[in-house]
Amino acid sequence: MPMTDAPRGGLAEQVARDLTERILTGELGSGQPLREAALATALGASRNTVREAFRLLARDRLVVHEANKGVTVRTLTVDDVRDIYRVRLALEPGGLPLVGVDELDAVVGAAEADAAAGDWAAVSTADLRFHQLLVTALGSPRFDEMFLSVLAEQRLAFAQVASGRDLHAPYLTRNRGMVDMLRRGEVAAAESELRDYLATAREELCRAVGG
């Protein structure tokens, strides 16, 4: 659908959000080129608007401009991964006492169904949604906006390593465990589990990204 009914700044933000969502769902992966002209045609936007969207995505560390390559989706480093988890550890635990348990339960249930069907890309998307709910529960639009970019970077890190059952199955089980803890009112236990979960995931992903 052509994006023609907003000021240039707003339209560029729409394009940037659309591309961020494609990264979150795994449609766009690390190293993938983003063609300015093709995107402008597909989105019904001007090339200047797409160029501005690229600037916004570069600000959020989701794309890079390289000589002779143009704009590509970023490839993350070990330092990037460590910083992602620094943000996650600072924000996510605070959402545990506030989040709706039924909503978390529904996300985990959907992920379990996806796992049973062997759709591990969908499991990954559901896992990111689980953690996004924790930050949304904090009630800060600024946190929400910032965390969306963090999760998009997280998805890029997933895409750089072996994905599927080995990557996601253990954490799906742990997500279910946290929901059960919250259902029983064991918020402190859920927080301890989440912190260990994130620290473990950080080290595993650092080893994988670092080769």
Image (cartoon, grey):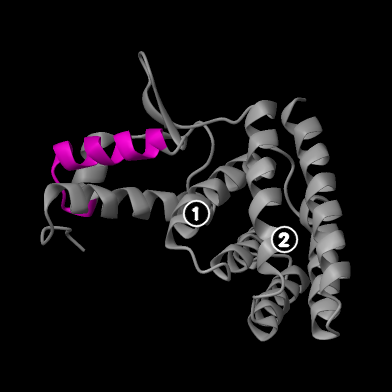
Image-based side of 47 in relation to 114, left or right: left
What secondary structure characterizes most of the magenta part?
helix
Image-based side of 47 in relation to 84, left or right: left
Crowd class of label 1 (few under 14; some 14 to 19; many from 20; radius 10 Å): many
The boundaries of the magenta stretch are: 43-59
Crowd class of label 2 (few under 14; some 14 to 19; many from 20; radius 10 Å): many
The residue that disc 2 covers is 93
The residue that disc 1 covers is 148
Q: Position of residue 148 (x, y in %)?
A: 49, 54
Residue toward you, 188 or 20: 188
Three-letter residue code for mark 1? Leu
Q: Position of residue 33 (x, y in %)?
A: 40, 32
Quadrant location, the C terminus: top right
Secondary structure type for disc 2: helix
In magenta stretch: residue 55:
yes
Instruction: Tell me what residue is drawn at x 65 percent, y 75 percent.
Output: 98
Residue toward you, 109 or 166: 109
Instruction: Tell me what residue is drawn at x 22 percent, y 53 percent.
Output: 43
In magenta stretch: residue 151:
no
Distance, label 2 to label 1, CA atoms, is 17 Å
Up the image or down, 187 lies above or below 2; here it is below
